[in-house]
Image (spheres, rainbow, N blue to C red):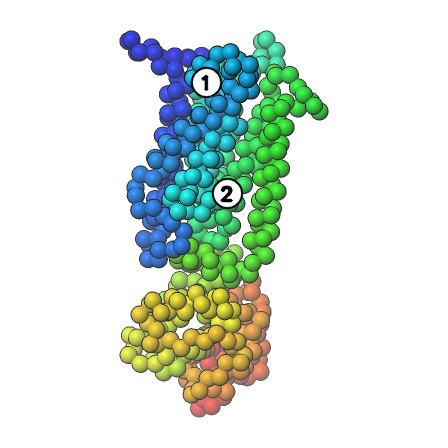
């Protein structure tokens, strides 16, 4: 044990040093989270609806305020557990030894709720951001308990458990897991609060298990009072997480993705769809989200438009509008033509229309909020990109085929061997002698085809 460091006339409690180190580590991790979010918005070029403060020190400010509030709460809770001693000697409020984790948690939560409002960030999202940093700060703080001799427990005189060391390792693992969840939340849709509720579950579970080797007297059912409190943490976290995910996943997938794009922007990342025999390394491709075509396919769309010079392009399934914009960029480069795109879902259509209006490419785009199977198109179609609901792709091609230019191009997305409905539909059209099909080996699969009728 090294409870104090003696530096000449100065006597410094090692607990104070480790708490300060823990706060600094938590601040650095929290700052790293703000920085990665800020960098994402810069790359996407979209401000998003979730606030990212423009300062470059917010992590240190938040960690400092929250850490101070947690220490005050932890000390106050510890002292209030023995009210008679407090009444007899109020000076016990001030001291370097004796802190209660639950009090620290309450103090920290109060501070975070206040800071979330000051920064203009939704409370649950703010708690998500701060959870990994809180776990790291607590982990390092436990080393202070180890050095001061507080928390080392034995079940017999000759056998001592270094509980703070156990907790240090456990909480570092918890922090790493929560940081990983945060990275996933940046890449794809996650419900706000999911990381924080996982923190509650893991924190409660860690402290519940560690209490089994404490030598303190047991209470009801052989549990410590602290274990009962931590069990409540686990149940509360699990219940809140279940309710949150149930409500979130009740939303349409399209709406979840659109909301994520509005909040985070377009996040470039490696393609994560599973390998197929024709495309065994999907990680070589890139994506923005799980429903928009691969980035390389978007580039292919633009290149194809500039190559075949279509006057009329029809796209089914606008979704986020990225594919429409790729086509429109090709039309703009050509200097002529237009793309008619349709999206049935009003909420998804509104988000795409907003993107078109701010893109500077609106003059090349005719966006319609209607079903592809009810959309009327005047004139000859030179380029058809079928990318709506998979179950409709074959029907769409059949519907627009009479209006297709025999020398035009038909593309059907999501036609990999793992997405059989589109692939089989294309091959069925080919077997009937309606189109000629080429299957391109992209991660999600792409059919490129031409109409057979009318060709000499």
In the image, residue 273 sits, relative to residue 373, either above or below, namely above
Q: Quadrant of the N terminus?
A: top left
Residue at x 46% of width, y 60% of height: 258
Does the image show residue 306? no
Residue at x 53% of width, y 80% of height: 374
Residue 171 circle label: none
Q: Which of 445 and 362 lies nearest the eye of the viewer? A: 362
Q: Which residue is mark 2?
A: 195
Answer with mark 2 or mark 1, whichever residue precedes in sequence. 1
x and y, in percent, of residue 300 in the image: 38, 69
x and y, in percent, of residue 196 in the image: 51, 41
Of circles 2 and 1, which is in front?
1
Q: Which of 177 and 451 lies nearest the eye of the viewer? A: 177
Residue at x 37% of width, y 69% of height: 356
Q: Which residue is mark 1?
A: 93
Spatial CA span between label 2 and label 1: 33 Å
x and y, in percent, of residue 159 in the image: 58, 12
Residue at the farthest front position: 87
């Amino acid at each position: 044990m090294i409870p104090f460091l003696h530096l000449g006339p100065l006597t410094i409690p090692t607990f104070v040093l480790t708490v300060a180190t823990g706060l600094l580590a938590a601040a650095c991790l929290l700052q790293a989270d703000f920085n990665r979010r800020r960098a994402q918005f810069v790359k996407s070029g979209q401000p998003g609806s979730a606030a990212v403060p423009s300062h470059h020190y917010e992590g240190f400010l938040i960690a400092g305020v929250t850490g101070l509030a947690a220490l005050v709460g932890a000390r106050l809770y510890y002292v209030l557990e023995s009210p008679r001693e407090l009444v007899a000697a109020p000076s016990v409020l001030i001291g370097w030894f004796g802190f209660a984790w639950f009090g620290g948690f309450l103090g920290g939560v109060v501070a975070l709720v206040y800071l979330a409002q000051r920064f203009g960030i939704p409370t649950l999202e703010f708690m998500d951001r701060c959870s990994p940093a809180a776990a790291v700060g607590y982990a390092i703080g436990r080393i202070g308990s180890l050095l001061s001799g507080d928390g080392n427990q034995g079940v017999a005189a000759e056998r001592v458990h270094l509980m703070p060391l156990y907790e240090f390792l456990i909480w570092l693992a918890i922090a790493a897991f929560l940081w990983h969840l945060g990275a996933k939340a940046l890449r794809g849709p996650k419900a706000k609060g999911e990381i924080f509720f996982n923190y509650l579950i893991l924190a409660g579970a860690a402290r519940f298990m560690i209490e089994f080797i404490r030598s303190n007297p047991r209470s009801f059912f052989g549990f410590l009072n602290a274990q009962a409190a931590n069990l409540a943490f686990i149940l509360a976290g699990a219940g809140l997480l279940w309710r949150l995910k149930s409500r979130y996943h009740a939303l349409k997938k399209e709406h979840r993705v659109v909301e994520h794009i509005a909040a985070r922007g377009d996040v470039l990342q490696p393609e994560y769809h599973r390998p197929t025999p024709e495309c065994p390394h999907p990680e070589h491709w890139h994506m923005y989200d799980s429903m928009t075509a691969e980035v390389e396919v978007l580039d292919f769309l633009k290149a194809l438009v500039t190559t075949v010079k279509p006057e009329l392009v029809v796209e089914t399934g606008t979704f986020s509008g990225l594919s429409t914009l790729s086509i429109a960029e090709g039309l703009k480069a050509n200097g002529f033509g237009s793309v008619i795109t349709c999206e049935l879902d009003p909420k998804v259509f509104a988000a795409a229309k907003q993107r078109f209006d701010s893109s500077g490419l609106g003059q090349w785009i005719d966006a319609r909020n209607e079903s592809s199977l009810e959309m009327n198109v005047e004139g000859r179609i030179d380029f058809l990109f079928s990318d709506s609901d998979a179950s409709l792709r074959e029907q769409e091609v059949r519907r627009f085929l009479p209006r297709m230019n025999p020398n035009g191009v038909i593309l059907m997305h999501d036609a990999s061997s793992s997405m059989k409905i589109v692939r089989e539909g294309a091959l069925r059209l080919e077997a009937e002698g309606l189109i000629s099909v080429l299957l391109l080996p992209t991660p999600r699969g792409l059919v490129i085809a031409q109409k057979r009728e009318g060709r000499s």
